Amino acid sequence: MLKVENLTYKVKDKILIDGITMHFNVGEIAIVLGANGAGKSTLLGLLSGQLKPNSGKLSLVDKLMKDFSQIELAQKRAVLSQHNVLGFPMKVSEVVLMGRYPYFESTASKKDLGICREAMSLFGVEKFADRNMLSLSGGEQQRVHFARVIAQVMDASETQQKILLLDEPLTFLDIKFQLEFMEIIQTFCKTKNVMVVGVLHDLNIALKYADRLFMLKNGQLIAQGKPANIITPKLIEMTFGIQPNIQELNGKIQLYF
Ligand SMILES: Nc1ncnc2c1ncn2[C@@H]1O[C@H](COP(=O)(O)OP(=O)(O)OP(=O)(O)O)[C@@H](O)[C@H]1O
């Protein structure tokens, strides 16, 4: 479990994250929602250890995140950020292997190479293995980055829980692959000892796949829980400033605007 207690993050006098307490469980997809500028990416930056909180605590299982070395942290969590631009040519297989860099010094082991093959096949990019990454379309490149981050946390176990942080992962993907991606992630986190924390802008996809939702507004957590327990027209209006109609179908909520 990843536990976050009373987390605050400021830049100069501006409070970007304001006393947030939350936790994440393995096998769950947690989705953070909020309007532009609410603090979602900042929160992900704090969860990943890339940003240091001004106050509050983050702990993974029983160890404080600040006590992990950089290499231990890289073995515990993978981050797919919003902007994954590669500035130079690299083969697709080399990009995916980057996910295993925290695990070897100069030569990848058979295990690392096997994990990369498995990750590439999950996202249907093994056929691109020898292609130059820069020759792929935006959506294809995004799928390679999924394979890279999945490879980084693929060998999670009961005693080695891992975290997958996804900042707007569906950008660049067509609707079919958006749904396919969410299905893959759902199966992945339920079968491996991984917790997924994602930021999404598509509310209906979030409602379909989230085990728990976290609603942010002005850096504050204004609601958290299972979608069916927390989503109301009032909450959506408070968060996004628009009023939806809500319908429930097969136990899942859908919003219409
Ligand atoms: N280094 C910084 N200095 C000052 N303000 C910052 C800094 N980093 C982020 N902010 C501000 O903090 C707020 C939250 O930013 P953040 O990127 O976390 O929002 P977000 O919810 O991810 O937004 P979006 O949906 O637009 O990606 C924004 O108003 C942003 O301008």
Image: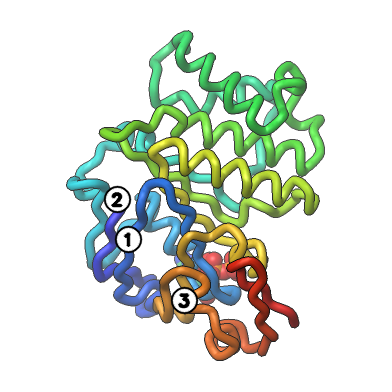
Q: Which residue is mark 1?
A: 23
Q: Which residue is mark 3?
A: 229
Mark 3 Cα-neighbour bin, 10 Å: few <14, some 14–19, many ≥20: few
Image quarter of the C terminus: bottom right
- Give the CA separation, mark 1 to mark 3: 17 Å
Residue 31 picture location, percent across and down: 51, 62
Residue 73 picture location, percent across and down: 33, 39
Residue 117's quadrant in the figure?
Answer: top right
The residue at the point 66 percent across, 36 percent down is 86
Q: Amino acid at mark 3?
A: Asn
Q: Which mark is residue 159?
A: none
Mark 1: secondary structure: strand
Left or right: 158 with respect to 256?
left
**Do the residues bearing badges 2 and 3 touch, measured as CB atoms within 8 Å?**
no
Upstream in the sequence, badge 1 or badge 3?
Answer: 1
Upstream in the sequence, badge 2 or badge 1?
Answer: 2
Q: Is residue 57 visible?
A: yes
The residue at the point 46 percent across, 76 percent down is 229
Q: Which residue is mark 2?
A: 1
**Do the residues bearing badges 1 and 3 touch, measured as CB atoms within 8 Å?**
no
**Would the CB of label 3 be found within 8 Å of ligand 1?**
no
User: Relative to 121, does residue 214 appear above or below in the rendering?
Assistant: below
**Do the residues bearing badges 2 and 1 touch, measured as CB atoms within 8 Å?**
yes
Left or right: 182 with respect to 198?
right
User: Relative to 71, does residue 82 appear above or below in the rendering?
Assistant: below
